[in-house]
Image: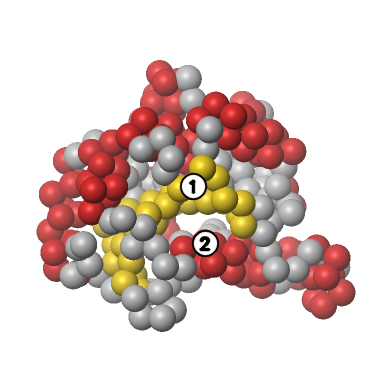
Amino acid sequence: MMFEPDALARKSKELEGATPEQILAFAFETYPKIAISTAFGVEGCALVDMAVKLRPDVPVFTVDTDYLFAETLALRDRLVEKYKLNLKVLRPLITIEEQTQRHGLNLYQSNPDQCCAIRKVEPAQRAIEGLDAWITGLRRDQSESRAAIQILERYDHADGQPYVKVNPLANWTRKDTWRYVMANGVPYNELLDRGYKSVGCWPCTRPVGEGEDERAGRWAGQGKTECGIHTFAARKG
Ligand code: SF4
């Protein structure tokens, strides 16, 4: 398995000219314990479509924060049905009621970082425990905070064991993603036809106007751009 930072950096550079399918094929061949994470954005749907064509039983995980739109849950069911997805749904350790008792009403307003830590980051950390590689649908042109992602990135688990984050769509634009989705009949969230460009939890997502950044509708006015799932660990290479 390839974990050494310099070797990973070389391979990552080499894969800059590869298709997402070629990157997925490399990851499947190289890392036995591997899974895809998705919140069922358009990138995740495209990635799932590509991945199941290469490996039908590829493990996929998602986090259900208890604050998801009905449209997102309907899409999740549709994808499971269409692809017979090997999907694991992770949930927070506490319910919304317990969260309210401990931290007050609407933590997503008073302290969205803490709400995301409880309802998104901790379940995702549980899901990646023990993996050799974690595949995501991140793209560089989604936002400034994602502009520097590499195709292969090295991280360490809490116990010090290494893992690799694989970003097969790092090079793709929003247009590339939509082109793939339309050409392959991939299901996507119907909210994306109703002015939303990125869909998360309903209290923290709003539609965005023409010309606005595609993640501008997430935590609008809160000075927050990431939930923490992709930023909780420091890169090692
Ligand atoms: Fe809470 Fe909003 Fe984060 Fe969802 S996106 S976990 S509702 S703060």
Mark 2 is surrounded, within 10 Å at the Cα level, by few (under 14), some (14 to 19) or many (20 or more) other residues, namely many
Residue shown at 29% from the left, 67% from the top? 154
What residue is pinned by disc 1?
Answer: 60
Whole-percent x, y for residue 189 in the image: 61, 32
Say which quarter of the image contains residue 196. Answer: top right
Q: How many marks?
A: 2
Residue shown at 34% from the left, 76% from the top? 161
Q: Is residue 226 visible?
A: yes
Residue shown at 33% from the left, 66% from the top? 163
Q: Is residue 113 visible?
A: no
Spatial CA span between label 2 and label 1: 10 Å
**36 relative to 5 in the view: left or right:** right
Tag 2 near tag 1, CB within 8 Å = no
Up the image or down, 70 lies above or below 234; here it is above
Say which quarter of the image contains residue 160. Answer: bottom left
Up the image or down, 219 lies above or below 234; here it is above
What residue is pinned by disc 2?
Answer: 127
Give the numbered dot on residue 52. Answer: none
The residue at label 2 has a CB less than 8 Å from ligand 1? no
Give amino acid for label 2. Answer: Ala
